[in-house]
Image: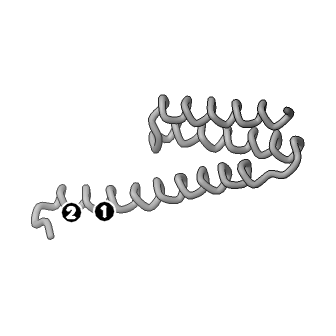
């Protein structure tokens, strides 16, 4: 355990951020799973919109990298477009 006051504070801040980041990542994974499990095109479109929103919020909060999210959104869109066929 740290002895210096600032180090103790940093440890506490990091712990709080870790919990917040885990919650955000879990929410993103849930939205992605709902998109994948969607059976109809309409359900998938609705789930796609929610997944994209969750991904964008994760980028805004600095939890995920913007290029990672861009790749995930691209793959989701590709999957959604192929559902019609």
At horizontal 80% and vertical 51% (from top left) the residue drawn is: 38
* Residue with the mark numbered 2: 8
At horizontal 73% and vertical 44% (from top left) the residue drawn is: 50
The quadrant where residue 71 appears: top right
In the orientation shown, which residue stands out farthest toward the front?
Answer: 85
How far apart are the two marked residues, 1 and 2, measured between alpha carbons? 6 Å
* Residue with the mark numbered 1: 12
Say if mark 1 contacts mark 2, CB within 8 Å.
yes
At horizontal 88% and vertical 47% (from top left) the residue drawn is: 40
Label 2, secondary structure: give it.
Answer: helix
Front in this rendered view, residue 20 or 50: 50
At horizontal 25% and vertical 55% (from top left) the residue drawn is: 10
Front in this rendered view, residue 28 or 84: 84
Front in this rendered view, residue 26 or 12: 26
Label 1, secondary structure: give it.
Answer: helix
Numbered label attached to residue 71: none
Relative to 42, say whether 37 is above or below. below
Q: Please state, as top left, top right, bottom left or bottom right, where the C terminus lies in the image.
A: top right
Relative to 71, say whether 51 is above or below. below
Question: Is the residue marked by circle 2 packed among few (<14), some (14-19), or many (20+) residues within 10 Å?
Answer: few
Front in this rendered view, residue 40 or 73: 40
Question: Is the residue marked by circle 1 packed among few (<14), some (14-19), or many (20+) residues within 10 Å?
Answer: few
Where does residue 36 sit, x and y in percent of width and height?
71, 50
Q: Please state, as top left, top right, bottom left or bottom right, where the N terminus lies in the image.
A: bottom left
In the orientation shown, which residue stands out farthest toward the bottom?
Answer: 1
Left or right position of 47 against 52? right
Relative to 21, say whether 44 is above or below. above
């Amino acid at each position: 355990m740290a002895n210096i006051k600032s180090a103790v504070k940093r440890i506490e801040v990091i712990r709080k951020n870790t919990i917040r980041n885990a919650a955000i990542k879990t929410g993103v994974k849930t939205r992605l799973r709902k998109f994948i499990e969607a059976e109809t095109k309409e359900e998938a479109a609705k789930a796609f919109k929610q997944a994209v929103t969750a991904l964008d919020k994760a980028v805004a909060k600095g939890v995920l990298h913007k290029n990672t999210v861009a790749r995930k959104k691209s793959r989701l869109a590709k999957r959604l477009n192929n559902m019609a066929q």
